[in-house]
């Protein structure tokens, strides 16, 4: 299948560049770039964002990477993208329609790079893209662009619902599932029921 050309995804204070390559174990999908991340050109660069600490403590990386090192995540078999490319001071500024419109672009990326799994960081984007009113944490029954789907808590410091320990537990469970899938094949809890293409 020939995919349409994707528009450039970088620029000063603009959309962040995707950090992806073919055949990754998983891709983390943030909601959208924060203003600090967009200005720096690096993912999860906002003050108080716990992403890099969480993935280290969860065993995904062997050291705590800095935002400037975000491309090094590829060496661990993981990538980064955002659901919506428009930078905002808060994800609350995004509309439901922006998430829905972004779903086609995200599916194109997933079909192009074929990661085994995509992990949404927060429920908002996945809920809007799938028209689901109730989205559980963890593995989902649908695939997106051929990839298994997980929904993880947003690591933003503004997310007071999850402590650092709670985030580490959730991301650690995700890491264990990814490693199990690589070692033993398809996980039954992520079996395909419906597919978004």
Image (cartoon, rainbow, N blue to C red):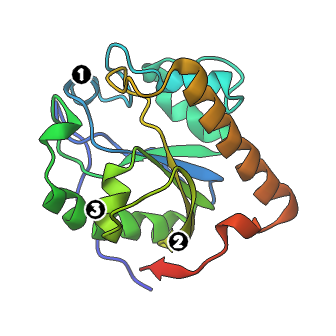
Q: Would you identify the image quadrant in which residue 102 lies? A: bottom left
Q: Provide the secondary structure element on which disc 3 rests.
A: helix
Q: Say which residue label 1 marks.
A: 36
The residue closer to the viewer here, 85 or 152, is 152
Please state if 136 lies on the left or on the right of 189 as rendered. Answer: left
**Numbered badge on residue 128:** 3
Badge 2 density bin: few <14, some 14–19, many ≥20, Cα 10 Å = many
Front residue of 51 and 67: 51
Local packing at callout 1 (Cα closer than 10 Å; few below 14, some 14-19, many 20+) is: some
Q: State how far apart marks 2 and 3 are (Cα).
A: 15 Å
**Looking at the image, is 74 positioned above or below residue 62?**
below
- Which quadrant is the C terminus positioned in? bottom left
Q: Position of residue 188 (x, y in %)?
A: 75, 69
Q: Earlier in the sequence, mark 2 or mark 3?
A: 3
Of marks 2 and 3, the one in the foreground:
3
Tell me which residue sits at (36%, 27%) in the image: 159
- Quadrant where the image shows the N terminus: bottom left
Pick whichever of labels 2 and 1 is earlier in the sequence.
1
Q: Is residue 67 above or below residue 195?
A: above
Q: Position of residue 183 (x, y in %)?
A: 86, 56
Does 151 sit left or right of 36 as displayed?
Answer: right
Q: Nearer the viewer, residue 68 or 130?
A: 130
Quarter of the view holding residue 185: bottom right
Which residue is located at x 52 percent, y 71 percent?
143
Q: Residues within 10 Å of mark 3 (few under 14, many from 20)?
A: some
Residue 143: numbered disc: 2
């Amino acid at each position: 299948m020939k995919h349409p050309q994707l528009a450039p995804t970088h620029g000063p204070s603009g959309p962040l560049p995707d950090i992806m390559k073919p055949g990754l174990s998983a891709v983390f999908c943030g909601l959208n770039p924060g203003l600090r991340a967009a200005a720096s050109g690096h993912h999860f660069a906002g003050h108080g964002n716990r992403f890099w600490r969480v993935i280290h403590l969860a065993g995904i990386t062997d050291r705590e990477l800095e935002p400037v090192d975000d491309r090094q995540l590829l060496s661990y078999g993981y990538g980064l993208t955002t659901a919506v490319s428009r930078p905002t001071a808060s994800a609350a500024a995004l509309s439901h329609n922006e998430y829905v419109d972004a779903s086609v672009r995200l599916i194109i990326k997933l079909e192009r790079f074929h990661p085994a799994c995509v992990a949404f960081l927060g429920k908002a984007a996945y809920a809007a893209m799938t028209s689901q009113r109730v989205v559980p944490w963890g593995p989902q029954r649908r695939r997106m662009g051929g990839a298994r789907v997980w929904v993880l808590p947003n690591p933003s410091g503004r997310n007071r619902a999850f402590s650092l320990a709670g985030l580490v537990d959730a991301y650690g469970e995700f890491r264990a599932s990814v490693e199990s899938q690589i070692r033993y094949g398809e996980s039954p809890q992520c079996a395909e029921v419906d597919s978004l293409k």
